[in-house]
Amino acid sequence: MASGARAPVPEDSVRTVSPGRRGEKGVSAPTGDSVAVGTLKSAASPVRAVVASPRPAKGKAGREAARRRLQLLPASQAEGRGEGAQEDEDEEPLLSVPEEDEEEAQPLPPVCVSPMRGMWRDEKVALYCDEVLQGCKAEDADEAMSNYLSEKLKLKDKWLGVWRTNPELFFVKYEEASIPFVGVLVEVTCKPHQSLSSCFKVTVSVAEPFSSNIANIPRNLVNEILEELEHSVPLLEVYPVEGQDSDIHDIALALEVVRFFYDFLWRDWDDEESCENYTALIEERINLWCDIQDGTIPGPIAQRFKKTLEKYKNKRVELIEYQSNIKEDPSAAEAVECWKKYYEIVMLCGLLKMWEDLRLRVHGPFFPRILRRRKGKRDFGKTITHIVAKVMTTDMVKDLSSDTLLQQHDDLDLALDSCYSGDTVVIFPGEYQAVNLALLTDDIIIKGIGKREEIMITSEPSHDSFVVSKADNVKLMHLSLIQQGTVDGIVVVESGHMTLENCILKCEGTGVCVLTGAALTITDSEITGAQGAGVELYPGSIAILERNEIHHCNNLRTSDNSKSTLGGVNMKVLPAPKLKMTNNHIYNNNGYGVSILQPTEQYFIVAEEALNKGAASGDKKDDSMLSRVMQNLNLEMNNNKIEANLKGDIRIVTS
């Protein structure tokens, strides 16, 4: 929820405090058909949630707690709170405070917009590696972040901010989607940092005018919770508001730098393993984050990574809290539970490390796709034509020769599973699903009979891949491929050669991906809706594109897509792929029509001055430079119509 948006809590779900009867509570009359989004705690309630471990914990547990922006209850306190809440509900309700005595919270002012959102990846790398960490070791990262933030806080010791905290502090129960945080406008007083073993704390008090994202939150409840916390809250929970001087913007940036570091870049295993070059590791993680933001890694995969990272953090906290509740030598059951939680963490850790290693995610961190061995030819040397239709009639096969061997299926998956090299699968109008399209290892032809719009093959959302081929020659003809939920490219050519002829590809994740050493031919087809490029060519791949329409690609669902270069066709160089494009129409893509990604400005054997000019000028055409680049890349482009792409027609991008 935006800081300026407010979620009013219906009065029938609010517990108010009577000024003259401390410790007692009352409820107002129900408000008709209103729906409660949360039940506020009584200001004097004995079961109000408190921040876990107000005193600095020791060792790794303390460092873990210090990095958590929204701190959760220990299990023992959570259980106690639940019992107390039930007792409260059984008590006889008292009359509510009259509405005129209640102070309505004003809307929150806007918080400072982080400049990090507009930074290029090399700017982020320079900020973290050169300015903040300065080549330090992993075990010294906490100290480096602490020193960086301390210097920025010296700019101003008092300022206004929005304190965003866990709703558990204020609500007995609430809908998480409705109230992601409770925000209160506070005046912040910065104090010197005590030690590295505890997180930064600042002193806060409710600022005027009383403002919150919860319209009718009682002010005295806010004051009493702050009193319990001794008016000291984690600094990373406070967001400076707009309208203050430039020093506050510097503090806001510093806070965002630290939040991003602990939310995304830092791993608690970093200082437990030998890491010779920590800043190089941080650079790889920044590249991973930027790949997620600009669509190089498709949106569904990005969500999977974020969920895995969040799950890892939560599981580690669970283990720490579980261990802290074991008072003496653990019992056999407790030891088994500890090991169970530990190995779950180790497995999640391994998955995250695979994501971070670029050698393991050349084409994204997908699960193995092709697990089936090639069947080859049938023993008796014949090929079969597989008819896919609910019912087969003689009219369907009238154009086939009399000696054609036929096999009818009402399920596309069964037809594909029955294929050997040389077979043909003929599909009649209808809607189909087939997980075996992600296991193409034999040379087959899959073709539709009728209008391509009427022969719809949709992906299975619960699977990672849609169409994946490792066969020497696979051909798909006269079909509509509709991607739904899968995270891989709509079509991935891992090796061998694939032909797409007169097909419609409606993408949801990545478009067509041709991996290193593989080849692809696309003719008379339409590609649209990809979150990244419509066609993605990896180093050393080969592609022929003729008479195709590629449009409305780079359809990102991320907030930071302003600098994305992906669009119609994207080529990754070193070694250079080979591409021939003839009579294609590439239009209305959110990036460039064609983008060429090279590792350094010196890779192409062209004049450095011309190359730099092309990389800097973007849309400005330098025919001489482009012709030399295309010659060096074996890039042949004839009679293509490239227009109305958001960033321009052709761009050479230096990674």
Image: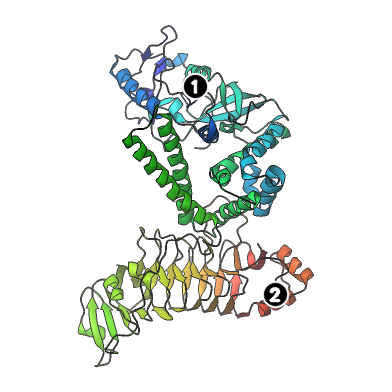
Is residue 206 visible in the rendered structure shown here?
A: no
Residue 547 image position (x, y, % from top left): 51, 79
Q: Position of residue 92 (x, y in %)?
A: 29, 14
Q: Nearer the viewer, residue 163 or 331?
A: 331
Nearest the camera: 76 or 611?
76
Q: Give the number of the mark in front: 1 or 2.
A: 2
Q: Which residue is mark 1?
A: 104
Q: Image height check: is 492 above or below 8?
A: below
Rendered location of residue 375, percent (x, y): 33, 79
Q: Amino acid at mark 1?
A: Glu
Crowdedness of circle 1 by 10 Å Cα count: few (<14), some, many (20+)? Answer: some
Q: Residue furthest top?
A: 20
In the image, residue 363 lies at what x, y percent?
A: 51, 64
Residue placed under numbered mark 2 in the picture: 626
- Residue visible at 52% across and 61% down in the picture: 361
- Residue extending furthest front? 329
